[in-house]
Image (cartoon, coloured by chain):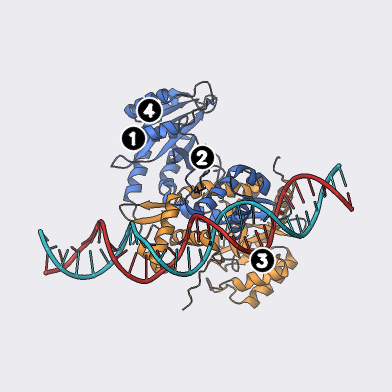
Chain colours: A blue, B orange, C cyan, D red
DNA sequence: CCGGAATATTCCAAATAATGGAACTCAATT
DNA sequence: AATTGAGTTCCATTATTTGGAATATTCCGG
């Protein structure tokens, strides 16, 4: 008969299916009941049940006995610590981000691209204590954020095209770019300018300027942005911060390239 | 010779093995080569190879082609975001931790227990910008930290005993408690006192006072600590902060218990 | 430029683990 | 007491994983 498989994506092997379940639980954003998960999944009851058992016994999920709900487990926090330190730019970029934050006094975001989406890996709030995981680790859309567009713009042409077509183009605000054509055009402008702007495309009243972090070979490693509200600043005001921003981005790129793990 | 796969888990099924490999890669703390991992693992070459392939194709690991190394992948950061938000106390505790930090002006740690080890889930630095993942997500020993002892002390007797025997009792400093008996005795004292002290047991010159965060049923949910250096403060000085600490711990416990996810 | 060694990757029959339909338990309703 | 619905277990079947060995690739030193 047919190899049954495939739900939404390409889940290879048992591990893939298990991780798929992980994602589903995490995506719910709150403790999930078995029945809920069963309804969304195309696994048979027994299969899903065992998958959940395995993940729970592995500490990837936590099971609340009294409420009979599953939630992401703390083992992930441990693992993520390693991931964040090793394969994100954040630890390397930190001193530069700190310095930029001091200098400009606005909110700074450091982001990387993960599967066409923007993944925030660090953040400094304007003059306020820093957020933690609650912000870092968040994902956002690529087509309507400053960092997203900055990274998309400098992707190799075919990757870029693929990524552009993967976007969902929901009109968050009246200014959101909602077609691949509009986005492609903006990306060309960004490539020419070297920086991108978010002109309230994601959230009303929120603007930002962003620059890509490029390796010497031109590979996109991430992006850095300075965000402000329209009440406190303007696009022109942000544009003045451009030198500080691009300089910092370049410093981070340099530091990342020179960084070698001790052997 | 028995290679004990050190993590608490007995690897059940393929998923368990894969996660075991994940842990190993994460534990290296730097990009790992295939051969390195092979040497440490008791899997045959082909098996390990395929596990790594699967994990990589799932985004749990990242493979650096040019250097031929594996490192934890960004997918983990995404997942951890969910884990941190949902099954850690940190987001709920945040306002209280913030307030305590303001009030006492010393470093605050919020920790939870994960497999007999201390997992830090949040941190406020004394009057300075906060650390991010670089601190949260870190693990530490249970037997020689304030938060660790505070949690151990209030575990149910049999769990406690089990946990005590799981400790490794390395003498980090001259004051480290290095036997199960010494620890058990201290735990009894802590239970009576309601708070624990780290008397330079983990690091020379670092002291702390910690309190458990207990549910109304008495279950250990986590622990909260105020840390200082011996240069700036003394144990007696910290003891004076006890009311502020335990009050905050109680508030967090209350908030956590009343917290219901919206249905 | 050529051998040889170290490392990475693929093959495939045998071993093992995952599968899922159905039966079962348990609690809350009716 | 009977019914429903959620959660859990069973077990013969089936698909996946396994791992020793063969093959490919890369890196060196001569």
Give residue A88's position: percent from left, percent from top: 43, 48
Q: Is mark 1 on a helix, strand or loop?
A: helix
For the question of whether residue A79 can be seen, the reply is: yes
Work out whether disc 3 and disc 4 sit on a shared chain: no
Vertically, is B30 above or below A111? Answer: below
Depth check, front residue: A130 or B29: B29
Give residue B195's position: percent from left, percent from top: 70, 63
Can you identify the residue that label 4 sits on? A187
Can you identify the residue that label 2 sits on? A139
Q: Do the residues labelled 2 and 1 touch (CB within 8 Å)?
A: no
Question: Dot 3 falls on which chain?
Answer: B
Give residue B205's position: percent from left, percent from top: 54, 65
| Residue at 55% from the left image edge and 64% from the top image edge | B12
Question: Dot 2 falls on which chain?
Answer: A
The label shown at residue B152 is: 3
The CA distance from mark 1 to mark 3 is: 55 Å
Can you identify the residue that label 1 sits on? A158
The label shown at residue B201 is: none
* Mark sitting earlier along the chain (2/4): 2
Work out whether disc 2 and disc 4 sit on a shared chain: yes
């Amino acid at each position: 008969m047919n190899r049954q498989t495939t739900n939404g994506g390409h889940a290879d092997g048992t591990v893939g299916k298990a991780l798929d379940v992980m994602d589903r639980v995490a995506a719910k954003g709150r403790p999930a009941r078995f029945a809920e998960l069963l309804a969304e999944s195309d696994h048979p009851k027994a299969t899903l049940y065992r998958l959940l058992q395995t993940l729970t016994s592995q500490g990837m999920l936590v099971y609340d006995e009294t409420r009979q709900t599953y939630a992401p487990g703390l083992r992930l926090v441990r693992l993520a610590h390693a991931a964040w330190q090793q394969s994100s730019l954040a630890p390397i970029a930190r001193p530069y981000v700190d310095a930029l934050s001091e200098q400009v006094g606005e909110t700074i975001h450091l982001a990387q691209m993960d599967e066409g989406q923007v993944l925030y890996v660090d953040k400094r709030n304007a003059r306020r204590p820093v957020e933690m995981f609650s912000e870092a680790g968040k994902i956002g859309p690529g087509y309507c954020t400053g960092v997203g567009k900055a990274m998309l713009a400098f992707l190799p042409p075919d990757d870029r095209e693929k990524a552009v077509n993967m976007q969902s183009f929901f009109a968050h605000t009246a200014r959101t770019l909602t077609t691949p054509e509009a986005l492609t055009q903006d990306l060309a402008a960004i490539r020419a300018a070297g920086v991108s702007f978010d002109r309230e495309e994601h959230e009303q009243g929120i603007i930002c300027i962003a620059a890509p972090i490029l390796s010497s070979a031109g590979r996109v490693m991430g992006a850095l942005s300075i965000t402000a509200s329209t009440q406190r600043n303007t696009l022109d005001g942000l544009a003045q911060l451009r030198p500080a921003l691009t300089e910092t981005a370049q410093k981070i790129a340099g530091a990342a390239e020179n960084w070698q793990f001790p052997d």
